[in-house]
Amino acid sequence: MTEDELERALRQTLAGRVATSRPLSADPAGAALRRARRTARRRTLTGLALAGVATVLVTTGMAQLGGPTGHGGTPTVVLGDPDGFSPSPLPTATSPAPGRGPVRAELDLIIGSSLDTSGGERRELTGVSGVERAQRVPDYGGWLVTSAATPAGRTLWWVPPNGSEPQVMLTGADAVVVSADGRQVAWRDGAELAAAGVVGGQLVAGSRTAAPEGAVPIGFAGDAVLIRQPDHGGVSVWRRSAGGTPGRANRDVLTVYGTLPDGRVVGLVSAGSPRQPCVALLDPARDLTPVRTGCGPAVATDGLGGISADGRWLLLNAARRNALLVDLAGLGGAAATHPAGPAVAGSVAWTRSGAALHVDATGGLVRVRPDRVLAGERPTAYALDGVAPDERLVVVADTRS
């Protein structure tokens, strides 16, 4: 039925119901039609408003889903996506820094002059260059970063955890060594050896002692400092808490790699017949007297290597330019040493899950897992994306509890 037909029928119906012959002051049919039209218009406007709101919401949602791509956002998955719709990552809260993004690894990395944390953050280290070693400070206390040797000596920086610029703690030192727990530092300063604790980026409770020319600190055994004597004169122990000078040097000790949880020192000694470098457990309370010795494949005496946090494994270099994994629990046995991939070219850092990370001569990152090495795997180096050929890669040592 058309609108005209509906109007005529309504007028006829209303006219038939009128009981009086007097003219009406108003047209009942017209009033009814006007009310019907106003209602229809209101319904139409309401429908259009709801449709507009829905359109805005849909448009806004699509704009968010298809907004700036960025990097590092979490892709949005839309249930029931229409065919051909590919969701884009949501934009991150802050714009990524120019250049490469952070490099992820199980441990923090220093790449050139930037710090890439295992959590995926990247910090530029203003004023820091030529990094050789780096160590986390316990209790989220930042990082200690040591430079390579230069004509002006070595530099030690403290990198605060709050994002502030690195601070120089030492400069011009002939040698610098940081304890495995990140709480102590020892260095050579002119004609003296010095050591101090580290608290909040400050050197505290310092000690100094005279030392022969060429004697340098190479490690810690608790609060004692291990000193390598010049001219292949062995290694001595400086118990700085007791004052005095370093004790008698054990001339058979060639180098040290660190300590076990029970305090014994792991190092190389000259032993056997004919004499050769052998891995040994040393007692720091008795001038580094060997407690147990294991002589196997020929090993390098460059001092590059590291001990796992549980004291089970030692990763070091063999004399034939490859790495060896030594089972310290079975030291002296026939099956204690295992080939472990490319030779170590820098520091070795162990993860809390029991894997060793180091950089080889090509600048690639090597990951050594003892269980896989025992199963016959030969670790290989792999290049990290985003690392330029002229950027030096350093693995940051984690703190040891």
Image (spheres, rainbow, N blue to C red):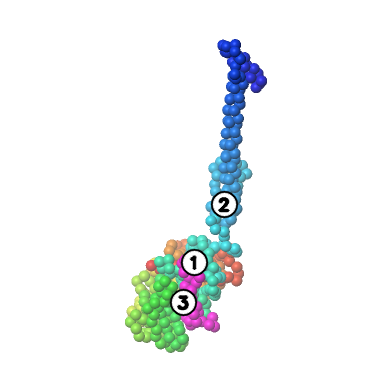
Q: Earlier in the sequence, mark 1 or mark 3?
A: 1
Q: Report x, y in % for residue 392.
A: 56, 71
Question: Could you tell which of marks 2 and 1 lies nearer the N-terminus?
Answer: 2
Of pointers 2 and 3, the one earlier in the residue sequence = 2
Q: Which mark, residue 169?
A: 3
At label 1, counting other C-alpha atoms closer than 10 Å, the crowd grade (few under 14, some 14-19, many 20 or more) is: few
Q: CA distance from mark 2 to mark 3?
A: 43 Å
Q: Is residue 162 magenta?
A: yes
Q: Which residue matches tag 1?
A: 163
Would you say the residues marked 1 and 3 are in contact, meaning their CB atoms lie under 8 Å apart? no
Gap between marks 2 and 1 measured at Cα: 27 Å
User: What residue is disc 2 on?
Assistant: 89
Q: Is residue 131 magenta?
A: no
> Which residue range is magenta in the image?
150-176
Around disc 3, counting alpha carbons within 10 Å, would you say few (fewer than 14), some (14 to 19), or many (20 or more)?
A: some
Q: Residue at x 51, y 76 (%)?
A: 147
**As drawn, 115 above or below 33:** below
